[in-house]
Image (cartoon, rainbow, N blue to C red):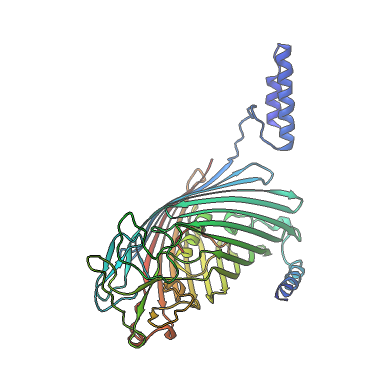
Amino acid sequence: MRKLILFVLACAALEGCASLGVQPWEREVLARDDMQLDTNALDTAFDDHIYFSKEGTSGGRGFGGGGCGCN
Amino acid sequence: MAGAASAAAAAGVTDMADKEMKIGAALAAATCSLLGTATPGVSIAADAEPKWDVESAFLYYGESDDRVNDLSLSAHATRDFGDERTLGLDLSVDSLTGASPSGAIASGGAQTFTSPSGRETYRTPAGEIPLDDTFLDTRFALNGSWSQPLARLYTVNAGLGFSSEYDYQHIGANFGLTRDFNQRNTTLSAALAYAQDTVKPVGGIPLPLAQMTDVVDDDVSPGNRGDGSDTKNVLDVLLGVTQVLGRHSVLRVNLSYSDSSGYLTDPYKILSVVDPVTGDLIGRTPAPGASGPTGVYLHESRPDSRRKEALYAELRHDFSGKVLQVGYRYSTDDWEVDSHTVESRLRLPFGSSSYLEPHVRYYQQTAASFYRYSLANVTPLPGFASADARLSEMNALTFGLKYGHVNAGGNEWNARLELYRQTAKAPNEVLIGNQIGNAQMPDFDAVILQFGYHFKL
């Protein structure tokens, strides 16, 4: 049931998203390196690894991290 | 088409047989150019565009009070094969030293413990939180991934990863699919990862809640151990939406589910056994002629499955060249560890080619249902118990600053400094007698110092 609600919400969100966004010629800022969601990939990987080994929760941004006996 | 041209030029020789071969090569080169694939054995005219994008960094992580120190070298390289086909390679080497909290509580008298190998002892002075200083490890990790368009608007990616350390091996695979909608303003992604890890602790796998024994000789196995190794499997599923909100904003939202099963216990963590009324450590005398623990300590025991669900949202917004990044994560699991994480970075360009980036992160979590500060000396014992502070109530704060500079060649070097402070709290309901108001948690501060160089080849 919970999954069905999530699915319906996702569809509604997708429908709502159709009114958002920009035209292809309006992407000058969005195309910049510092606007990419995966900039600083190495910083993120280091941080995820540190927090994975020191805190009780991991993942969310990407997979749960790990591959390490530190937790 | 440069490859076809050069190969065609090379074909202009007199010998007929040779000519036929060269024409064949030219046709192969032309076909490969059209298909956008590399041509084996045929040199393609120099292309000025860099193919490799490499981020490399050196990291130092150091905790207060001579606890864990980590030196790490990492490189993240991507190779662009054109037509949005990319190869990603990650390589990382870690060297860990220092002492780690064992889970035992501080006591009014000095305490002696048998080390994880079961072959020697270490001592903790009165009033101090016991730290196991036999902690030493080197870890190698390698990941490879491939990403390419599958059809119009679809991208597929797949990856493999390995890591190895003295007592732990990991192998994992992942697969993902994304689809663009709405003039590529909306991207939906789905990804799956599966990992199988092998834990091979020093001295063998301790039996759940087995008591720490006296030191044994090299040719004898400690009596409280089971098999030499065990495994853990992790399945991760991630669904994401990335949405362009306007010319200056982009939002990502992920829902993730993670299912871990197998050996999820920390083989090196123990619990102190205390008087059920006073909460004071129960003393113990080693056997005559033997050295061993001076208190009663049990190896921890965790459930063999854990299911986590998380919601993650990240927004990036450009304010006339300054970029604000705000992220939030909520995570919940069937161990009852619920957490909230809020994180923000602000990138402030200055001069023609430099930037400063302050960073702040706040984290808080609830305690796992089986978290115990210590165990009361009563029977029966609970099925699961851990005194690992990482499973207690906790909050943590990080402040950081990064400086980056892009040189004339377009490559960037950067440095960042982060300060991390973790504060844990044992919930009142797990404290016994004298522990109330006196519980000592292994809180710590850590410094993270990183130097990086980002270049193209």
Q: Is residue B233 above or below residue B15?
A: below
**Camera-nearest residue between B399 and B277:** B277
Q: Quadrant of residue B332?
A: bottom right
Image location of residue A14, percent across then percent down: 74, 67
In this picture, residue B29 sits left or right of residue B278:
right
**Camera-nearest residue between B289 and B51:** B289
Q: Is residue B81 visible?
A: yes
Residue at position x 31%, y 82% in the image: B280
Q: Is residue B57 visible?
A: no
**Quadrant location of the C terminus of chain B?**
top right
Image location of residue B111, percent across then percent down: 27, 72
Direction left: furthest residue = B289
**Camera-nearest residue between A10 and B116:** B116
Image location of residue B43, percent across then percent down: 63, 27
In this picture, residue B143 sits left or right of residue B373:
right
In this picture, residue B327 sits left or right of residue B404:
right
**Camera-nearest residue between B141 and B284:** B284
In this picture, residue B46 sits left or right of residue B409:
right
Q: Is residue B114 above or below residue B87?
A: below
Image location of residue B390, percent across then percent down: 44, 71
Residue at position x 61%, y 58% in the image: B193
Direction top: furthest residue = B15
Residue at position x 49%, y 44% in the image: B408
Q: Is residue B292 above or below residue B81?
A: below
Q: Quadrant of residue B232?
A: bottom right
**Quadrant location of the N terminus of chain B?**
top right
Looking at the rendered structure, the number of numbered marks drawn on it comes to: 0
